[in-house]
Image: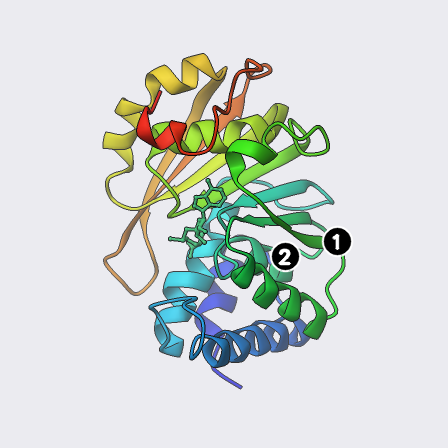
Amino acid sequence: MHDYSKLISYLSEYGVSVSDDQIKKLDTYYEMMIETNKSLNLTAITEFDDVLIKHYIDSVTIVRDIDMSGNKSLIDVGTGAGFPGMVLKIIFPELNITLFDSLQKRLTFLNEVISALNLTGISTYHGRAEEAGHVSSMREQYDLCVSRAVANLPVLCELCLPFVKTGGIFIAYKSDKGNIELESASHALSVLNASLIKEDTFTLPDSDMVRDLLIFSKDSSCPKSYPRKPGTPSKKPL
Ligand code: SAM
């Protein structure tokens, strides 16, 4: 078992306690990720201490700004190896989570983790956000949408905001250039009927790595023509 004390003390600052069982789950997830990473590209970060800070603690930083209690529905768009969605599920087990990605192999890995950890209230969904954003069981169905390292903000807004309920929240996990992206996304936000609630800039613990959480409210429904067809959001960003 690895040493999770940095994560435990980080979360305790926000009043979140973590049980031995949750730590065991995180450790099994880590071991499975490292094993699978030998044959499938899941992560470039593999040393435990780096994974702890750059993947696990980074994933839970939204606890700074968002009340994560209760059975809110959350979609992680472009979850990859499960960041931030899988970590959020382990730490906040009441959340109802959809791990969404266009790469089936990564979702197969995540399904193996879900089954090994006996997690319920979490599922994977394979598809392109541009298409799934029009599927009625997903469009405007989520209290929270999170996304990390998937696209520039104007593109990301078009991929993510259609999933969020009116009155729900979209959180973009960004690094130090978040404020520049924010300026470029003002048109996308106004077209998609969302607005910035807060920009939260900080450094990850024991590091000088700057992180920027951009938190948006979905003020009313997105026009039906968004998201546009696959590839268009990135080729012609709003
Ligand atoms: N969020 C993870 C993280 O921070 O470690 C993974 C980031 S990875 C760089 C980007 C992921 O987004 C990939 O797994 C890719 O398949 C997925 N992705 C990119 N564009 C997408 C789209 N339009 N719809 C669904 N998934 C997409």
Please say which color scheme the image uses. Answer: rainbow
Q: Quarter of the image holding residue 92? A: bottom right
Q: Is residue 11 left or right of residue 157?
A: right
Which of the two labelled residues, at mark 1 and mark 2, occupies the earlier sequence position?
2
**Picture layout, residue 196 above or below residue 11:** above
Decide: is 96 above or below 221: below
Contact flag, marks 1 and 2 (Cβ < 8 Å): yes
Q: Residue 202: percent from the left, percent from the top?
A: 32, 47
Q: Few, some or many C-alpha atoms within 10 Å of disc 1 (few <14, some 14-19, many ≥20)?
A: some
Residue 107: image quadrant is bottom right
Residue corresponding to mark 1: 121
Identified at 39% across, 66% down, the residue is 43
Is residue 12 at all visible to an observer of this figure? no
Q: Which mark is residue 89?
A: 2
Give SS at disc 2.
helix
Q: Residue 55: tell me if it is visible.
A: yes
Residue pictured at 29% horizontal, 46% vertical:
175
Give percent across and percent down for residue 190: 42, 13
Residue drawn at (37%, 48%) of the image: 149
